Image: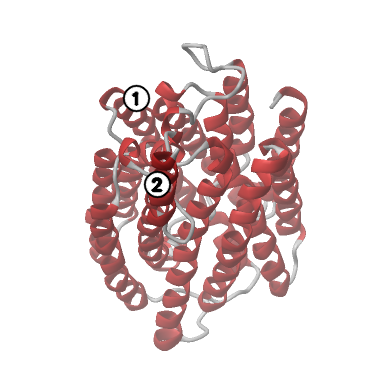
Amino acid sequence: MGKEMAEMHNNQRRRIFGLNPNIFFLGLVSFFTDVSSEMIFTLVPLFLANVLGAAPVIIGFVEGVAESTASLLKIASGWLSDKMGKRKVLAFIGYAFSTLAKPVMYVANTWWLVLGVRFTDRFGKGIRTAPRDALVAESVSSAERGKGFGFHRAMDTAGAALGLVLAAAVVFFLQRGSVELAPATYRWLVLAGICPAVAALFVFLFIREAKNSDTGGAADAVCIGDSVAGKAGFDNRYWMFLAIMFLFTLGNSSDAFLVLRAQNLGNSVLSILLMLVLFNAAYAIVSVPAGIRSDRVGRKRVIVAGWSLYGFTYLGLAVASESWQVWLLFALYGVYYGLAEGVARALVADLVPAEKCGMAYGIFHGVVGITLLPASVIAGWLWQVVSPAAPFYFGAGLAFMAMLGLLLLIRE
């Protein structure tokens, strides 16, 4: 008994702000990475449209290919991490690929070169995402899984918010309230964004495989839903959830179209960056409470609330006629992300056996990523051929259909 008490004391002492060290440091990796990515990639749609003169359908194609082509790697890397029993090394390699790609944006002068950079960056994400999410899941007990993913999403989003604030400062000093993005401004953003990406790689020195973490044996129990604990394969609910995610994602095109819509309604580059700061602030604030709430009342209720809000937000973006309305809609969009993103990942861990956790996340992210190609191309076509409002009507409709599917077909 005394030994158990000593071990419990050690585990508690080793926690950082009440969190398993892996959760804290993986959050820090995502924080630095998103500071960098938001500075460099958030304005890529405006760089393509304003500087390189690319059409909306090309912008949708670039963003869709970047996400979808690399998505097959998420499946492979998830499977490989299960086979190796190693998550950290694959996650590190993925982050390293993204870091190496970013400086090339400084010399990008054609849309296909931008496509190459975006593909390489997403290639890295394809390698790292499933192993990293499996490492998050395996570093906490099932009772704290929502909180763990919520914290990770919050840190990721806080980094995005800081990156956008820094980007807004650069834009303010270089071009003030100009509606279109200037080439020189974008190059400064690329230079400033490289340093935090490098810092993220050094944080990996403090991350361990989950079997060495202080979870008190939690790693042996995670990723096992009660109804699938004895099964060798995936629960049918898992495949049904993937089908519902496919439907939802088909209408959830790249966020590049939100940026284009904001500019379409007369907002300056600086205003758009500040809107995105508001979006990420709302996302970060909501993520942890939403994760904790899902631990108590179930994942499905929280996801349905998020998807409902997403549908109404997209309807708002479709009918918006004044630039000020976009501020409120971006804030609501952040609340949707905070409610649904981390909780959906926690739900995946609830539905699959522990030994296939990496593969499950790989397939999940693969389905979402692959679907982004047709989703973004459809959105670009609707924008160009019908109207800038059309992609948002389409996305709202599919969101409400997916919400009904989740309510009626998924049992927790």
Where does residue 90 sit, x and y in percent of width and height? 27, 38
User: Label 1 is placed on what type of residue?
Assistant: Trp
Task: Locate residue 303, reporting x and y percent.
Answer: 68, 41
Instruction: Give the x, y percent position of residue 297.
Output: 73, 40
Q: Nearer the viewer, residue 172 or 86?
A: 86
Name the mark nearer the viewer: 1 or 2: 2
Q: Quadrant of the C terminus?
A: top right
Q: Is residue 203 left or right of residue 270?
A: left
Q: Residue at x 69, y 60 (%)?
A: 332
Q: Is residue 410 above or below residue 231?
A: below
Q: List x then y, in percent, for residue 244.
A: 64, 29
Q: Which residue is mark 1?
A: 79
Q: Is residue 233 above or below residue 367?
A: above
Query: As rendered, which of 106 and 381 lies closer to the eye?
Result: 106
Give the amino acid at mark 2: Ala
In the orientation shown, which residue stands out farthest toward the front? 2
Quadrant of residue 185 within the rendered picture: bottom left
The quadrant in which the N terminus is found is top left
At mark 2, the secondary structure is helix
Closer to us: 209 or 273? 209
Mark 1 or 2, nearer chain start? 2
Query: Spatial distance from mark 1 to mark 2, Cα to Cα?
Result: 37 Å
Total marks shown come to 2
Q: Residue at x 48, y 86 (%)?
A: 176
Mark 2, residue position: 6
Question: Callout 1: helix, strand or loop?
Answer: helix
